Image (cartoon, rainbow, N blue to C red):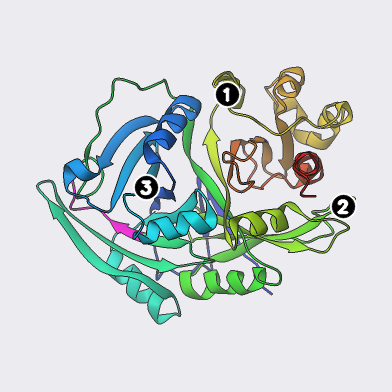
Amino acid sequence: MSKEVKSVDYGLEKIFEGAQDFLPLLGTDYVEFYVGNAKQSAHFYKTAFGFQSYAYKGLETGSKDTVSYVLKQDKIKLVLTTPLNSESPVNDHIVKHGDGVKIIALWVEDARKAYEETIKRGARSYMEPVVEKDEHGQAVRAGIYTYGETVHMFVERKDYKGPFLPGFVAWESDYNPKPVGLKYIDHMVGNVGWGQMNTWVKWYEDVMGFENFLSFDDKQIHTEYSALMSKVMSNGNGRIKFPINEPAKGKKRSQIEEYLDFYEGAGVQHIAVATDDIINTVSQLKARGVEFLPPPPQAYYDDIPRRLGEHKDMMKEDIKELQKLSILVDADEEGYLLQIFTKPVEDRPTLFFEIIQRMGARGFGAGNFKALFESIEREQANRGTL
């Protein structure tokens, strides 16, 4: 059992009084996807999600094995990487998993120390510390494996002034659709196999110094047909939050089992990105072709005032507008939140995105779990995978 965590709220940060300080994390640096065609994927994320051209590495810059496009929107950086030959290990990853998240890069002051501290606590090495240099200075990176083949990369960039990292050049493009209001990564969710959730909870506690500050079991997260369990891990300042899901027994196959089958192992299920105006953001995303899960029934929206309780008077949004866009609402003792989930963004039913706006609430939409998973099950039924 995880120890109780006391917290104090300072805006976007939560300071955990008992948190270990051997691994101070400044935030999410970037998220790297391994994809089959980075050029076309970059076009999709620019067109559909409003990301902007930022940096590039490829044959023209001396990279002979891979090409990478870096996209940026506010504080979010996505790196899309494709192999240039069949011998690349990147190619092997794509063949097995399809397009998906390979690297979750964490911004640190001292990448060598972060690597050494996690390795001595039991982490498996992905990449020993490497100093990368160009005319803009130097950066230090080092990496460790987490669940599945996913990697946490520690990035130290205090001595680097270039566009992204050494080896990259600024990517100039005439095509840059306007941003849609995405601000930063709120959290990233990992799916792990049967009986593996507590193993990885302990790993994050022991190796990374994280705290388990929220837990949900199959009594809370279930429908008539399926169930799952989840625990939310957070670092000391609350900037990095990693919920970890595992399947639970149900009458039919859960969304977690479907993910594990098609991804062929543990990996990142979804990335939650924050906005300050979810109605405007979702309206733009829908107009650009992003597909979202189908809406819950009318009764869900009729019940919103009751579920908001004491927070209903502070709610600024029109419920009819939220219903029109299929946006979900939940509340906790601190306030309320609004959220919506895309359909999988690839042909394999694996990775998807969550759009979230927090109005004081620090939870993860527990009150929406049933409605959300019933929507997912309807999609699973359409795919014949329920």
- Residue identifier under label 2: 225
Q: Is residue 201 visible?
A: yes
- Please tell me which residue is depicted at 43% across the width and 36% down the height of the picture: 41
In the shown orientation, is residue 298 left or right of residue 170? Answer: right
Amino acid type, residue under disc 1 in the picture: Gly
Q: Classify mark 2: helix, strand or loop.
A: loop
- Of marks 2 and 3, the one in the foreground: 3
Residue 112 occupies which quadrant of the picture?
A: bottom left
Q: Which residue is mark 3?
A: 81
Q: The residue tagged with tag 1: helix, strand or loop?
A: loop
Q: Main secondary structure of the magenta part?
A: loop
Residue named by callout 1: 289
- List x then y, in percent, for residue 181: 48, 27
Tag 2–tag 3 contact (CB < 8 Å): no
Alpha-carbon distance for marks 1 and 2?
30 Å
Which circle's residue, 1 or 3, is located before the other in the chain? Answer: 3
Task: Return the x and y of residue 202 as percentages of the image width and height.
Answer: 59, 74
- Relative height, residue 1 to residue 61 (above, below): below
Query: How crowded is the residue under tag 1: few (<14 C-alpha within 10 Å), some, or many (20+)?
Result: few
